[in-house]
Image (spheres, rainbow, N blue to C red):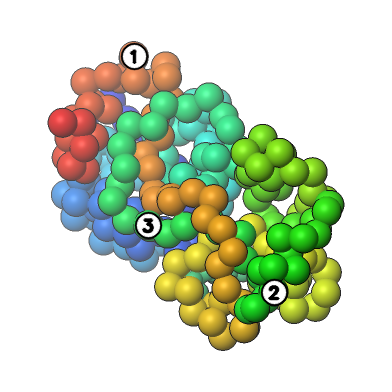
Amino acid sequence: MREMIKVALPKGRLYPMAAAAFARVSLGCPELLNPMRKLTYTDAEGGMEYLFVKPGDVPAYVEYGAADMGVTGKDTLLEEGRDLSEAMDMGFGRCRVVVAGLCGQKGRYDGIYGKRIATKYPNIAKRFFESVKGESVEVIRLSGSIELAPLAGLADAVIDLVDTGETLRENGMEVYETVAAVSARLVVNGVSMKMKGRRVKEIIARLGGGQ
Ligand code: PRP
């Protein structure tokens, strides 16, 4: 029997593209494209086992070796700061991490000392303001609907993902500064890279990476 490779796939907006990429590697497996409420799926013939996890949890599964590899956004990797080898840019999920706030308020924002920043990326926010800009800020951690914070008077600005820009437009907000360009990445466990190197490299090649 083939050596099994465990892959952590991110539920949420990256899932359809990540699943389609691995469905090609696994030669078919329609179950991967519609996992319903299942948490794992085994493609015994292809020697693959898939774990369906929250995008922010992918780095932990891969770092601890519960998965040999995983797909997650570069935003998550920047936030988690774990010791993982990034094997390839998957070429989808391209968007930006930005500082955004109310339209026409950038001047006011620039003048605030000790800005309040709402975000689901507290580490990225601290690093950007404190290390890159040399500015001390108060970071308010939220778990979703981040753009509501400036509208409701909770924060002076947000650090969040902007993809189409629709959420900002719909809510009278604009980008103040770009923090990072991000996309989906394939990360690989260091031990798996050594112990299962041949298969890991073969999968990376079939996903279109490794040149
Ligand atoms: C993300 C992000 C923005 C939005 C950006 O939120 O946090 O709110 O998408 O996309 P857009 O530029 O295409 O409008 P998500 O939909 O993941 O939900 P959340 O508010 O629960 O984080």
Q: Residue at x 32, y 42 (%)?
A: 89
Quadrant where ligand 1 appears: bottom right
- Placement of 68 over or under 57, stated as above or below: above
Q: Amino acid at mark 2?
A: Gln
Q: Position of residue 94 (x, y in %)?
A: 37, 57
The residue carrying pointer 2 sits among few (fewer than 14), some (14 to 19) or many (20 or more) residues within 10 Å by Cα, namely some
Distance CA(mark 1)–CA(mark 3): 30 Å
Q: Which mark is residue 105?
A: 2
Lower sequence index among marks 1 and 3:
3
Lower sequence index among marks 3 and 2:
3
Q: Amino acid at mark 3?
A: Arg
Front residue of 110/196: it is: 110
Q: Which mark is residue 94?
A: 3
Residue 160 appears in view:
no
- Placement of 41 over or under 45, stated as above or below: below
Would you name the residue on which mark 1 appears? Answer: 194
Snapshot quadrant of residue 15: bottom left
Q: Position of residue 4 (x, y in %)?
A: 32, 30
Distance CA(mark 1)–CA(mark 2): 52 Å
